[in-house]
Image (cartoon, helix red, strand yellow):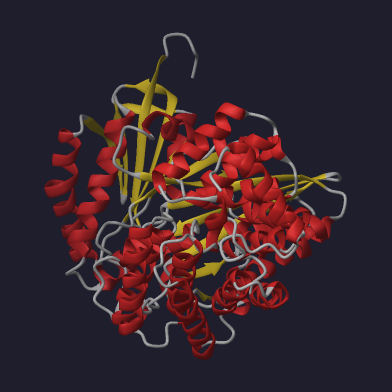
Amino acid sequence: MSEEGVERRLTSILAADVVGYSRLMAADEAGTLTSLKAIRRELIEPKTTEHNGRVVKLIGDGTLMEFGSVVDAVNFAVAVQRAMAERNVSVPEDRRITYRIGINIGDIIVEGDDIYGDGVNIAARLEGLAEPGGICVARNVYNQVKNKVEASFEDLGEKEVKNIPEPLRVYRVATEQLPSAATSPATKPLPLPDKPSIAVLPFTNMSGDPEQEHFSDGITQDIITNLSRFRDFFVIARNSTFAYKGKALKIQDVSRELGVGYVLEGSVQRSPDRVRITAQLIDGHTGGHLWSERYDRQIDDIFVVQDEVTEMIVGTLASGYGGRLRKAWQRRARGSKTQSVQAFDCFMRGLDLTYNFTKEDTRRGREFFEEAIQLDPNYAKAYAKLAWGHIEDAYQGWSKDYEGSLAKGLEYANKGIECEDEESWGHWALAGYHFFTMRHDRALAEFQRAIELNPNDADVLNDVGFCLSYAGRAEEGLESVHKAMRLNPHYPEWYSMQLGQIYFDARQYEEAVATFESLRSLETIISCLYRAASHAAVVHTAEAQKAIGRVLELDPQATLQKWTSVKMAPYKDPKDLEHFRLNLRKAGLPN
C-alpha cells in the first residue's frame, strides 16, 4: 500500500478472544454460538457504548476494538472481566466462556472502518500473553492509566513475541478481587494457617549465564532457612517452592496451591564486578505488591554479598516490630474469629503499645499479653513480652515494687521458655532480667542463645547492643545496633533512643547528641538523662540544662542518687557509672 493518501492516527487498541474456543465449539457448537451472541448483545455492546469505544471487527471468537481514551479502554476491560467472572460462577466449568484481553496505544493505518499496523499487532500479542480472565497492557498504557483507574498492575518484565522486533514491556492488570469462576472443587484453596504464611519462590537468574543459577538458588535457600527460624511464621519448604522454578506463574495460583497468604519473589542479575538483587513481597490473594527493594552490591566476596542481602531481606520482612510480613498479616487478621488469630491480634496490640515506652501504654500492653495468654496458654512470645513489660516497669522507675516487678519478669520469662525452648524471645526476656539485676555474663549468655535460635531478629540484636554497652563493651554494642538497623531499615525510634545511650557510653558525644536530637515522638526520663549528659560532655550548657528541666517535669523528685543507682544504671564497670554521674552533675541534676 502506498503511503500517499494513507490515513494514520494514534489510538487505543483492544484485542480480545475466547479461551478454548475450538474445544467449546467441538463440544457444543450451537450452544457456544448462542452464548457468545448473548454475551456480545447483553454485555459487550452496552459496555462499549458506556466506555465510548467501537467494535472494529469480529473474527470468529476474536474482537478488535478502538477507544479514543486509554482510560476508557482499561475500564471497559476490567468491567467486562468482572461481569464475565460473575456470570460464569453458575455455569459448568466445561461450558464457561472466558476472555483474554490485550491493550496497546499505537499508530494505526485506517482503511474505511478497519484498522491495521503494528499498533494492532502488538495488542493481539498482548492478548495472547494474558491468562484466562486476565488483561495485559503495554508499558505506554500502564504509564497513562496507573494513577487514573481503580486497578493495580504487576510488571511482567520484557517479553519476546512473534513478529515484533523489540521485546515488549508487559503489565498485568490485577483482577483477582473479582469472583473466581475458574476454581473447581478439584482446585479448592488450602486453608490458610493461623499465622503469617509465606512461600519464597526461586529467585530468577537474569544474568544470561546458566552458571549463576547456583547463586540465585542459594539466595532463595538462605531466605527460606532464615525465615523458618521465626517460629510464629509458616514457611513453605524448599522442595515445594522449587517445583515452580522456570515456570510461568500466576501468584494467586501459587498462593492457593501452597496454602499461603504471601509470596516472595525476586531476581538476581550479575555482571563480572557487580550484582543486583531485587525482592518483592506480594499478597497472595490480590496479587498486590506490599513491599519491594533493590540491592546493588560490588562483588568482592560473593558469599559475603549473599549473606548480607539475605539478612537484610529477612530482617525487613520478619523483625518483631517493623516486619512487613507480620504487619500485612495483622491487618488482614483483624475480625477473624479463630482463637489463635485473636491471640496474635492481642499480642500485636500489646507490642505496639509497649514500644511507646510510657507507663500507661506499658500497663495496657501487659493486659493485652495476658489476654493473649488466656486465649493461648502456650503462647511463648506473649509470655516473653509480658516479662519485658514488668522488667521495663522496674527499669523505667514506674513500679512501686521494683523487686516484685523484676520477680514477675523472671517468672514469665521462664514460663515462655518452658512453653517453647526453641523460641528465641523467651531467652531474650530472661537475658533482660539478668541484665537489669547486674548479672551481665548470664545476660549475654542468654542473648547468645536467642541469637543462635534466630540470628536475624533485629529487635533482639538491638538489645544485645544495649547490654554490651552496660557491660563495658560499648564499641561492640554499636556494631550490634547498627546491624539491627541494617536488618530492619524501617526501625522504630526506640532503636535510636538506645543507640544514643551507647554512643554516650562509647564517649562518642557528638554522635550521641545528634542521635538524641533526631528523636521526634519517643521520650523517657532515661533518654532525657542521657541527652543531658551528652550535651554536658561537649559543654552545650544551655541544652544540657534544658534536658534536665525536662527530666524534672517528668519526675519532680529526680535526683542524682535516685537515677544513678546500680538498679537504675546497671553498669558493670564502676568507671562507666561515674562517667554518667559526672556529666549529669555538669548538666545540673540535683544530688
Residue nearest the viewer, comparing 46 with 565:
565
Q: Is residue 515 left or right of residue 574?
A: left
Residue 19 place in picture, x, y as percent: 36, 59
Residue nearest the viewer, comparing 438 with 496:
438
Extreme residue toward the bottom, this view: 418
Residue 372 place in picture, x, y as percent: 34, 77
Q: Is residue 440 left or right of residue 389?
A: right
Q: Is residue 203 visible?
A: no
Residue 55 vertical placement versus 375 (above, below): above
**Identity of the residue drawn at 51% across and 64% down:** 395
**Identity of the residue drawn at 29% across and 37% down:** 57
Residue 559 vertical placement versus 24 (above, below): above
How many marks on residues? 0
Extreme residue toward the front, this view: 591
Extreme residue toward the top, this view: 4
Q: Is residue 107 left or right of residue 296?
A: left
Quarter occupied by residue 439:
bottom right
Residue 141 place in picture, x, y as percent: 42, 33
Q: Is residue 226 left or right of residue 170?
A: right
Quarter occupied by residue 205:
bottom right
Residue 384 place in picture, x, y as percent: 49, 76
Q: Is residue 403 visible?
A: yes
